[in-house]
Image: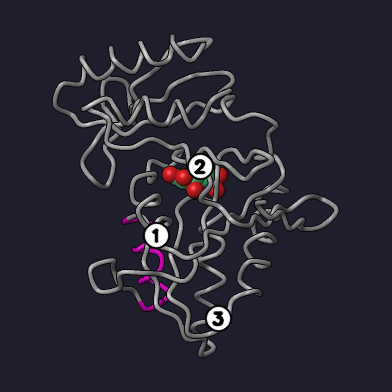
């Protein structure tokens, strides 16, 4: 409950910084959900914006609140994306994807002039990797892709293994793009750029949840108030 309160505070802070008329990317997850909820109230009061959601879940929530939606075929650039994160390091590099939306989240963030993260302070880490890294993979060739990811993990000193994400035993989780997710347990990611390249070199890997040098600002809620963190 406390954590939900903090997430909402971070979301409110981000919303307070936005001017009317912006093209906004809407993130996914429990923190982004607070943002969309607050944005919906503001839209009901006449706030003007046009938004691109990063998942079917966020799109559904936004539609229910009458938030005007578009897509990246109609809008080729966005002004700001507001999204949550699973881990945030001191340079504002992120791990994302616990909610399975990492591919659309990365496409939307990359199409945005600014990415702002909202989170509670439990997401702050010194080094990325304690949270399992979500890796979105094609269904075809899953065994070979899994083997190749395991080899990359060994090269990067992973402490334990990987797991195909499931919604129930034997039932793989399927992303909005129709792909699967492998959660990779690194413990500590000391060379995120090299790891990113190595993972993207694997043919069956669609995308991974390392968001490097993408986030410009984070609003992180603590019990003592919301901290504003900026990337160098
Ligand atoms: O795929 C999900 C997203 O990357 C979320 O933004 C991330 O998992 C953070 O979610 P939450 O705000 O629920 O902790």
Rate crowding at label 1 as few (under 14), some (14 to 19) or many (20 or more) other CA atoms within 10 Å.
Answer: many
**Magenta segment: does it hold 45?**
no
| Numbered tag placed on residue 98 in the rendering | none
Residue under label 3: 42
Q: Which residues are magenta?
A: 56-68
Residue that lies at the very extreme toward the right in this rendered image? 224
Find the distance from the CA under tag 2 to the CA under tag 3: 31 Å
Question: Of the residues under marks 2 and 3, which one precedes in the sequence?
Answer: 3
Task: Please state the horizontal and vertical placement of residue 60, each as a whole percent of the image.
Answer: 34, 63
Residue 228, above or below 189 = below
Residue that lies at the very extreme toward the left in this rendered image? 140
Q: Residue at x 28, y 17 (%)?
A: 146
Q: Residue at x 47, y 71 (%)?
A: 79
Q: Main secondary structure of the magenta part?
A: helix
Residue under label 2: 212
Residue under label 1: 58
Find the distance from the CA under tag 2 to the CA under tag 1: 23 Å
Rate crowding at label 2 as few (under 14), some (14 to 19) or many (20 or more) other CA atoms within 10 Å.
Answer: some
**Magenta segment: does it hold 67?**
yes
Task: Please state the horizontal and vertical placement of residue 199, each as a whole percent of the image.
Answer: 35, 26
Mark 2 or mark 1: which is in front?
2
Task: Please state the horizontal and vertical placement of residue 29, each as a whole percent of the image.
Answer: 48, 50
């Amino acid at each position: 409950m406390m954590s939900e309160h903090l997430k909402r505070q971070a979301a409110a802070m981000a919303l307070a910084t936005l001017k009317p008329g912006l093209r906004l990317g809407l993130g996914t997850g429990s923190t982004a959900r607070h943002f969309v909820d607050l944005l919906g109230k503001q839209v009901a009061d006449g706030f003007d914006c046009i938004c691109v959601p990063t998942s079917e879940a966020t799109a559904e929530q936004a539609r229910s609140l009458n938030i005007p939606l578009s897509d990246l075929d109609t809008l080729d650039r966005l002004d700001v994306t507001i999204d949550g994160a699973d881990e945030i390091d001191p340079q504002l590099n992120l791990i994302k994807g616990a909610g399975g939306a990492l591919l659309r989240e990365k496409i939307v963030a990359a199409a945005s002039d600014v990415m702002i993260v909202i989170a509670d302070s439990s997401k702050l880490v010194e080094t990325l990797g304690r949270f399992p890294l979500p890796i979105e993979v094609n269904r075809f060739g899953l065994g070979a892709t899994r083997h190749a990811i395991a080899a990359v993990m060994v090269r990067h000193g992973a402490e334990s293994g990987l797991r195909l994400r499931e919604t129930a035993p034997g039932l793989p989780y399927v992303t909005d793009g129709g792909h699967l997710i492998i959660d990779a347990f690194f413990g500590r990611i000391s060379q995120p750029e090299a790891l990113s390249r190595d993972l993207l070199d694997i043919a069956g890997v669609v995308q991974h949840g390392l968001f490097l040098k993408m986030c410009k600002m984070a609003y992180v809620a603590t019990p003592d108030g919301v901290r504003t963190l900026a990337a160098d």
